[in-house]
């Protein structure tokens, strides 16, 4: 990577401009990154060595990643009269440089404390990293033009970076109030943005000598480059990371405050315990010699009786006794003054309880000259730990759901959009002659199919959100199921025809159920769409109504598709789950259809039942209560009832 500078006043350079909203967005990202960095870096001075390293790492990721995000949003805001892509290696490398050099600066300041020389050195190192990140990112541009820099403006951008980095580190090493942090964040954001846009002002873009040659050079240079849309995704992830770390930082701060409060409470309890020890001895305290022979016992009467009635080791349950003996040896022969472990103790009438067992070596204290063994009940703490483990499992499940969502949406939204844009470009280019050629009819069909696929995904997401948010309206009334089935079959006829699937309706007479006709049709639309999608050409989908003895009815949709594996059947209504998963899956879809259908059914007081034999098709049922009159005999009901409800 070599920087080239402008020589002399001549030269033909491309005109450029900025997208105002993206410029504002870049400054906002810089502001959030600055605040997040101050929030995390403020914990460094008073932290333990291990936690200090963690805070330094967090601060470097926030500040370095935030500066990088601001940089590339600013790059995307820069509008040039020719296409621009970005080299992947240099793009990633610029991010690494920003984070690593910011880490060096924070670590340097944390190690040197209040030293002004260390602050200046760290500021220079961090500023150099910011400069390196910026100009490495600039060199990542792949375009039909040569990139040059105006020397004095380039030098000014470097000076701004060094000063801004030094000022940022000076503020970051102090734990200031929130208003002060906000003010400092604003100054840092302006400095970061100032460096970037000064560097951009130094850039000159000299187009190729001819358009054809320039285009050829751009194609060659961009063979391994990253499209700006991909850069936009990376920048969005970076911005999301900044916000996430802000939230995590606030959570950690709150956690530390709670820990400090608990420690203070523990100290107060310890003082009160010491005062009450002579009278009540809330913990069991055993005085023992090095052979484990009990010399004295202090504590609650029932526990004292247990400790005096058996050898010391037998107070611990058999499974934990090896750990107790190891703990004992660590103090007696291992040279440790104190050792602690969580063991289970047989407390007689109180049963088995988890205890912190602490052994202190006070043989050097003339007043004791023995080992002091304290048994402190921590059963409640064990319960809290179990609750935390359960919460962690729930968080892991939510994280997996989020990952499935990102994976599915990346495929299900980008694929139809790519089809729409691709065929539209072919039509714009008049590849097969003027519009009106029969070939374009096929393109229009593909654009329409991709659009319908895209809108179905969006509708499913919006529908699920409305249900979860309690915004979906449900008006229960008696309706004719056969009319609902005919309406659904009309909706699905075109999709079935295109897939070569035969639709059949077994009409055994009118059956009235209790539900919302509008939501019933929507639910059946999802179920029949799923059945058609997974049924091969020349297959069959059959709809019928069943009466049940328990006062319910079921609208049944049976397909001749491949069926669902038994180990996946219980998960098919989970959001974004697909039994045929992975990059090679045959069937399109975001995995939301059955999820929305289940939610709509439950909103009406019903349910969805799925039965399947792998290799022999699937049966899906919408189960709802029968209308009062339908439980004794088949009621009559015109199609107009359902049509009116839908209208």
Image (cartoon, grey):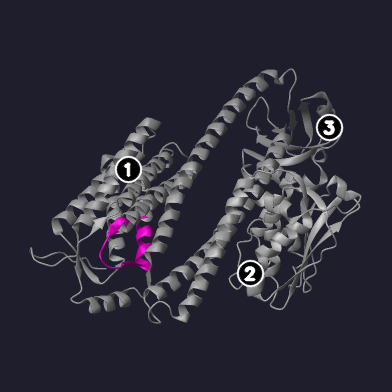
Taking the magenta stretch, the answer to whether it contains residue 97 is yes
Whole-percent x, y for residue 22 in the image: 33, 51
Above or below, comparing residue 610 to residue 116 in the picture: below
Callout 2 environment at 10 Å: few (<14), some (14 to 19), or many (20+)?
Answer: few
* Segment colored magenta: 77-98
**Secondary element at tag 1:** helix
Q: Nearer the viewer, residue 34 or 359?
A: 34
Residue denoted by label 1? 169
482 horizontally vs 330: left or right: right
Q: Which of the two discs, 2 and 3, sits closer to the camera? A: 2
Residue pictured at 20% horizontal, 77% vertical: 210
Residue pictured at 40% horizontal, 49% vertical: 60
Q: Nearer the viewer, residue 144 or 330?
A: 144
Label pair 1/2, CB-CB below 8 angstroms: no
Q: CA distance from mark 1 to mark 3?
A: 57 Å
Whole-percent x, y for residue 39 in the image: 42, 39
Whole-percent x, y for residue 82 in the image: 27, 67
Q: Nearer the viewer, residue 366 or 252?
A: 252
Asked whether residue 580 is in view, the answer is no
| Mark seen at residue 494 | 2
Whole-percent x, y for residue 15 in the image: 19, 61
Residue denoted by label 3? 350
Asked whether residue 540 is in view, the answer is yes
């Amino acid at each position: 990577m070599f920087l080239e500078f402008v020589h002399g006043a001549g030269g033909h350079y491309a005109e450029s401009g900025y997208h105002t909203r993206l410029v504002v967005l870049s400054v906002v990202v810089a502001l959030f990154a600055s605040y997040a960095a101050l929030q995390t870096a403020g914990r460094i001075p008073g932290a333990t060595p291990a936690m200090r390293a963690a805070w330094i790492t967090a601060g470097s990721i926030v500040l370095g990643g935030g500066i990088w995000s601001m940089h590339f949003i600013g790059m995307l805001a820069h509008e040039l009269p020719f296409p621009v892509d970005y080299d992947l290696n240099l793009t990633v490398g610029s991010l690494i440089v920003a984070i690593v050099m910011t880490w060096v600066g924070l670590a340097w300041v944390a190690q040197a404390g209040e030293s002004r020389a260390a602050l200046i050195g760290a500021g220079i190192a961090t500023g150099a990293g910011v400069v390196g990140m910026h100009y490495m990112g600039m060199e990542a541009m792949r375009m039909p033009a040569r990139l040059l820099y105006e020397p004095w403006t380039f030098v000014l951008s470097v000076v701004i970076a060094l000063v801004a980095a030094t000022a940022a580190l000076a503020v970051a090493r102090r734990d200031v109030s929130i208003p002060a942090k906000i003010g400092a964040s604003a100054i840092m954001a302006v400095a970061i943005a100032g460096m970037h846009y000064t560097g951009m002002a130094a850039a000159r873009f000299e187009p190729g000598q001819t358009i054809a040659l320039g285009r050829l050079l751009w194609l060659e240079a961009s063979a391994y480059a990253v499209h700006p849309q991909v850069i936009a995704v990376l920048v969005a992830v970076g911005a999301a990371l900044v916000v996430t770390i802000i939230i995590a930082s606030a959570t950690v701060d709150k956690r530390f405050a709670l820990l400090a409060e608990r420690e203070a409470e523990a100290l107060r309890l310890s003082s009160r315990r010491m005062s009450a020890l002579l009278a009540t001895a809330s913990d069991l305290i055993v005085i023992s010699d090095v052979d484990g022979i009990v010399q004295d016992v202090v504590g609650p009467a029932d526990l004292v009786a247990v400790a005096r009635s058996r050898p010391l080791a037998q107070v611990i349950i058999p499974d934990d006794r090896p750990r107790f003996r190891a703990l004992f040896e660590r103090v007696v022969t291992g040279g440790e003054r104190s050792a602690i472990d969580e063991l289970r103790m047989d407390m007689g009438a109180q049963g088995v309880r988890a205890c912190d067992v602490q052994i202190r070596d006070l043989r050097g204290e003339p007043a004791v000259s023995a080992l002091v063994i304290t048994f402190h009940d921590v059963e409640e703490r064990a319960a809290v730990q179990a609750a935390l483990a359960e919460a962690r499992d729930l968080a892991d499940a939510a994280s997996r759901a989020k990952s499935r969502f990102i994976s599915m949406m990346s495929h299900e939204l980008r694929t139809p959009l790519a089809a729409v844009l691709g065929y539209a470009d072919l039509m714009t280019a008049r590849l097969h002659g003027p519009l009106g050629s029969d070939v374009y009819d096929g393109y229009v069909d593909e654009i329409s199919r991709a659009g319908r696929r895209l809108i179905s995904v969006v509708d499913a997401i919006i529908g699920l959100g409305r249900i979860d948010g309690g915004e979906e309206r449900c008006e229960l009334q008696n309706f004719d199921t056969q009319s609902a089935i005919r309406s659904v079959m009309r909706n699905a006829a075109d999709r079935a025809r295109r897939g070569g699937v035969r639709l059949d309706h077994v009409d055994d007479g009118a059956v009235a159920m209790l539900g919302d006709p509008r939501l019933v049709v929507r639910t059946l639309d999802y179920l029949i769409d799923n059945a058609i999608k997974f049924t091969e050409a020349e297959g069959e989908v059959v709809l019928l109504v069943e009466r049940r003895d328990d006062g319910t009815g079921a609208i049944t949709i049976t397909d001749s598709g491949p069926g669902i594996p038994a180990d996946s059947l219980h998960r098919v209504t989970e959001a974004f789950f697909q039994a045929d998963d992975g990059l090679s899956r045959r069937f399109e879809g975001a995995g939301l259809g059955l999820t929305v259908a289940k939610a709509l059914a439950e909103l009406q007081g019903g349910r969805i039942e799925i039965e399947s034999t792998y290799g022999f098709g699937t049966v899906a049922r919408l189960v709802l209560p029968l209308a009062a009159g339908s439980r004794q005999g088949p009621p009559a009901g015109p199609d107009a009832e359902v049509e009116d409800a839908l209208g």
